Amino acid sequence: MIFTVTCLTTCVKLLLIPAYRSTDFEVHRNWMAITHSLPLKRWYFEDRSEWTLDYPPLFAYFEYVLSFVASLFDKNMLVVENLNYESQQTLLFQRLSVIITDLVYAYGSYLCCKSIQKSWRTDVVLPILLITNCGLIMVDHIHFQYNGILYGVLLISLSYAMQAKYVLAAFWFSVLLNMKHIYMYLAPAYFVFLLRKYCLNGVSIKNNINTARSIKNFATLGAIVIGVFSFTFLPFYDHLGQVLSRMFPFKRGLCHAYWAPNFWAIYNTIDKILHLFLLKLGIVTKKSSSASMTGGLVQEFSHEVLPSVTPIVTLVLTASMMLPALIKLWSLNRHPSDFLRSIVLCALSSFLFGWHVHEKAIIMAIIPLSILSIMDVNDAKTFLLIGIVGHYSLFPLLFPSSLLFIKVMLIILYSTYALHSLSKVYPFAAHNFSLPLLNKVESVYILGLSAIFFYENVLHHVLGIHNKLPYLPLLLTSLYCSVGILYSWIQFYVNFMRRRNDVITKSNKKVK
């Protein structure tokens, strides 16, 4: 089934080659040019383009390898001075490079399905939910990025964790961190899980611990992590500070250009409403020095009424929200599905409360939730809610009107299959007069997305306020979606904290 689904999905991706592409298309072309044309010591200093290299070195090596194949298509795309360069050969190569590297994602999906007890859920349902993820299609094959290969590496790591092959799980996660550092938000869950299951061999600190074995295992994991990071960063030892300053640009502001549907979208909206209310009362005067949060620009800004938020505040808040889940993960000694749940909670906590979060980061929670959705009905419910809402929140990335039909069909087809297939997996969980697995309120909320869509694409223009308030639809989309994601996070968190440590499954058993 995975082979068939991969082939069919690849055909869809091939049809999208001429589709709209964002500035990320030029970003990655420029990175190929930098790594191909310049010596390594200048990669993280080059700034002739505004799209400077800001991913970890292992991803830069990936771009370097791609550049040699790119030279067979069009050598001009590898000239650093050729800013905003485009050609048919460049378009073809970059689109095909994403499609081909997606095979890593297909392989990761295969390993995950293989790691779970064989049934029609793992043979049919899960492969389709993973391979046809409409978020990845929208972000990678229209908007343009290389998320497929990254999530493929994540799935490979998760599959080895589910198989109790902890050393391999740690290795592949270290590789992932060195390709894109956003996955560091998942590191706390990995640390607790590997420490508990591998270093301590699942034994509680209160019980007898094989100290020698624990030290050996801990040293093994440390050697793997240090080895991968050394391979990646050692060539940049003399300007490591420059590399890190590119990777962590805190001056980009609290929110991305298009607000991610998280806690800060709600916080920003409340600040705007309070400011307008106080303006009406004449208590405050309009500020002209602070940047507009709804201007669609990536920049720093100050809140008008509520306290302005700094990176350290988001870091502390994110860590605080993760902590209960990590403590719970330590106390559980069941099977790796609890590890997957902690991964989801870390991903959602960082998405909701992190600094300068991109809307596409919601996929980091949706993909492991896809795996959990065939294991437990409550996880399936959360997957449906976050899957539908999270994928809809990606719509602003595909803003050209020519993509309207494509993005609507992608989310409708994927969501319909998810609702239908999971209703077959859990037929006893159906509710009358509601969507499968969801209650009436949740169903009304999901259907409410159609009202948001109608306002953005029809009513906003009919009312004639599209010139005066051009970013109002974006604000409404982020605000509406943030409510659903926050609700799902709370519900998922409560269910996880209620889990009990019943039966300990053998480490060599496949996850049921």
Image: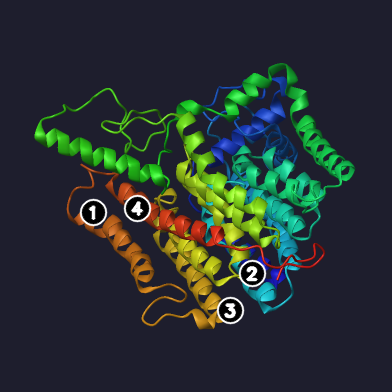
Q: Earlier in the sequence, mark 4 or mark 2?
A: 2
Residue 356 position, x and y percent, is 47, 36
**Mark 4: amino acid:** Thr
- Residue corresponding to mark 4: 477
Q: Secondary structure at mark 3?
A: helix
- Residue corresponding to mark 3: 425
Q: Is residue 319 above or below residue 406?
A: above
Indicate left or right for 299 with 230 as reference.
left
Indicate left or right for 25 with 254 as reference.
right
**Mark 3: amino acid:** Val
**Mark 2: amino acid:** Leu
Indicate left or right for 388 with 319 as reference.
left
Q: Secondary structure at mark 2?
A: helix
Cβ atoms under marks 4 and 3 closer than 8 Å: no
Res 355 seen here = no
Which image quarter holds the C terminus? bottom right
Q: Crowding at label 2, few (<14), some or many (≥20) Cα neighbours within 10 Å? A: many
Which mark is nearer the camera, 1 or 2?
Answer: 2
- Residue corresponding to mark 2: 126
Residue 293 position, x and y percent, is 33, 35
Residue 325 position, x and y percent, is 57, 50
Q: Earlier in the sequence, mark 1 or mark 4?
A: 1
**Residue appearing at x 33%, y 28% in the figure:** 302
Q: Crowding at label 4, few (<14), some or many (≥20) Cα neighbours within 10 Å? A: many
**Residue appearing at x 48%, y 50% in the figure:** 20
Nearer the observer, 420 or 262: 262
- Residue corresponding to mark 1: 460
**Residue appearing at x 71%, y 41% in the figure:** 66
Indicate left or right for 426 with 467 as reference.
right
Q: Earlier in the sequence, mark 2 or mark 3?
A: 2
Q: Secondary structure at mark 1?
A: helix
Cβ atoms under marks 1 and 4 closer than 8 Å: no
